[in-house]
């Protein structure tokens, strides 16, 4: 990878203003650490939680991004004080582990507001500036669960599927409607990340296969490694998808398999029992 090989960056980080949501925990916190290594002009972390990282190049704004009024106000303030950011990373996420029977429209709305509607609000605020100068980079953290499914994860899966579709439409709009081909986009489709959102529970916890085999076939991702991979795309100004680990590349053909094969695979992998272990782990915390 260019990042690890010391390849010369295609952007001047000293002039970059990075706008990041959910940078106080998990992948977002790893991104903040990796971004600080690049020494951008400023990182603006928008999160409902406080950040324990302090740095002269880091500004944390406390905001509930599910609240459109709050989020719009933050975006307007950022533009007024710093101009349109040059890098936007849409990372904040929420997960509500419930079956469809137990989920209410309010549950769906709350998850969608964090995982999807916040993307719309931020894009509406910053896209005009990106298009006008025809430069910058927009990163969206989706999930492979936007293409696959799991029991007790309907609200999360639906919200991530919406993000994937939104981002694909964004690319087409930038290229064909606005001729903003120098605005780069990265859609991140990770598998299981070792973060508090899923209670740091590995796939092997619910699998009926030997633990070593499950961990080999379905490894979870270290957030620091994924953050570095995202920095690679920012450094090289690459537009495209980031899929990690390797098994998520097979998501596109997964549902072409016969249903009985899917049933067998999902039984042995224990994919639909996984959320029970996540709920138990989070409850202990």
Image (cartoon, rainbow, N blue to C red):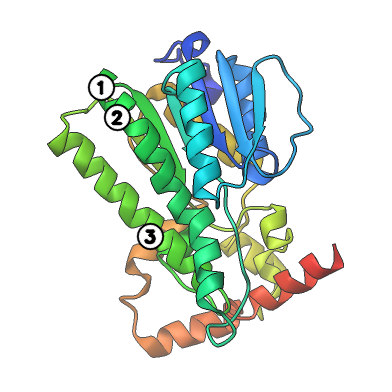
Location of residue 186 by image quarter: top left
Task: Find disc 1 in the rendering and name its residue.
Answer: 132
Location of residue 219 by image quarter: bottom right
Secondary structure beneath disc 2?
helix
Depth check: 244 or 113 in front? 113
Task: Find disc 3 in the rendering and name its residue.
Answer: 162
Q: Label 2 vs label 1: CA separation?
A: 6 Å
Please give the name of the residue rendered at 47% of the width and 20% of the height, measured from the top-left corner: 80
Q: Label 2 vs label 3: CA separation?
A: 22 Å
Secondary structure beneath disc 1?
helix
Direction bottom: furthest residue: 260
Q: Is residue 62 visible?
A: yes
Location of residue 27 by image quarter: top right
Seen in the picture, residue 76 relative to 273 is either above or below; the reply is above
Q: Position of residue 191 (x, y in %)?
A: 54, 57
Point out the image quarter for the C terminus: bottom right
Please give the name of the residue rendered at 45% of the width and 10% of the height, measured from the top-left corner: 12
Secondary structure beneath disc 3?
helix
At label 2, counting other C-alpha atoms closer than 10 Å, the crowd grade (few under 14, some 14-19, many 20 or more) is few
| Left or right: residue 156 compared with residue 254 | right
Sequence-wise first label, 2 or 3? 2
Task: Find disc 2 in the rendering and name its residue.
Answer: 128
Please give the name of the residue rendered at 57% of the width and 53% of the height, measured from the top-left corner: 93
Q: Position of residue 148 (x, y in %)?
A: 44, 69
Depth check: 1 or 149 in front? 149
Seen in the picture, residue 242 relative to 252 is either above or below; the reply is above
Sequence-wise first label, 3 or 1? 1
Q: Are marks 2 and 1 in contact (CB under 8 Å)?
A: yes
Q: Is residue 90 visible?
A: no
Q: Position of residue 149 (x, y in %)?
A: 47, 73
Seen in the picture, residue 202 relative to 271 is either above or below; the reply is above
| Left or right: residue 285 compared with residue 258 | right
């Amino acid at each position: 990878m260019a990042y690890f090989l010391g390849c010369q960056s295609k952007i001047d980080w000293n002039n970059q203003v990075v706008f990041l949501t959910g940078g106080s925990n998990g992948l977002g916190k790893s991104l903040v650490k990796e971004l600080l290594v690049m020494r951008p002009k400023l990182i603006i972390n928008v999160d409902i939680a406080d950040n324990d990282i302090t740095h002269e190049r880091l500004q944390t704004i406390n905001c509930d991004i599910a609240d459109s009024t709050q989020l719009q106000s933050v975006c307007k303030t950022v533009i007024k004080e710093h101009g349109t950011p040059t890098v936007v990373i849409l990372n904040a996420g929420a997960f509500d582990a419930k079956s469809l029977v137990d989920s209410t429209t309010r549950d769906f709305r709350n998850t969608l507001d964090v995982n999807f509607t916040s993307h719309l609000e931020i894009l509406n605020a910053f896209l005009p500036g990106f298009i006008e100068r025809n430069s910058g980079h927009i990163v969206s953290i989706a999930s492979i669960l936007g293409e696959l499914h799991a029991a007790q994860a309907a609200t999360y899966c639906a919200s991530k599927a919406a993000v994937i579709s939104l981002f694909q439409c964004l690319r087409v709009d930038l290229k064909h409607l606005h001729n903003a081909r120098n605005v780069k986009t990265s859609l991140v489709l990770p598998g299981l990340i070792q973060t508090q959102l899923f209670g740091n529970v590995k796939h092997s916890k619910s699998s009926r296969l030997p633990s070593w085999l499950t961990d080999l076939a379905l490894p979870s991702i270290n957030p620091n490694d994924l953050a570095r991979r995202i920095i690679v795309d920012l450094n090289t100004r690459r537009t495209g998808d980031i899929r990690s680990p390797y098994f998520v590349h097979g998501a596109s053909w997964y549902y072409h398999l016969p249903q009985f094969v899917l049933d067998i695979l999902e039984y042995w992998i224990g994919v639909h029992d996984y959320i029970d272990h996540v709920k138990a782990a989070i409850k202990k915390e």
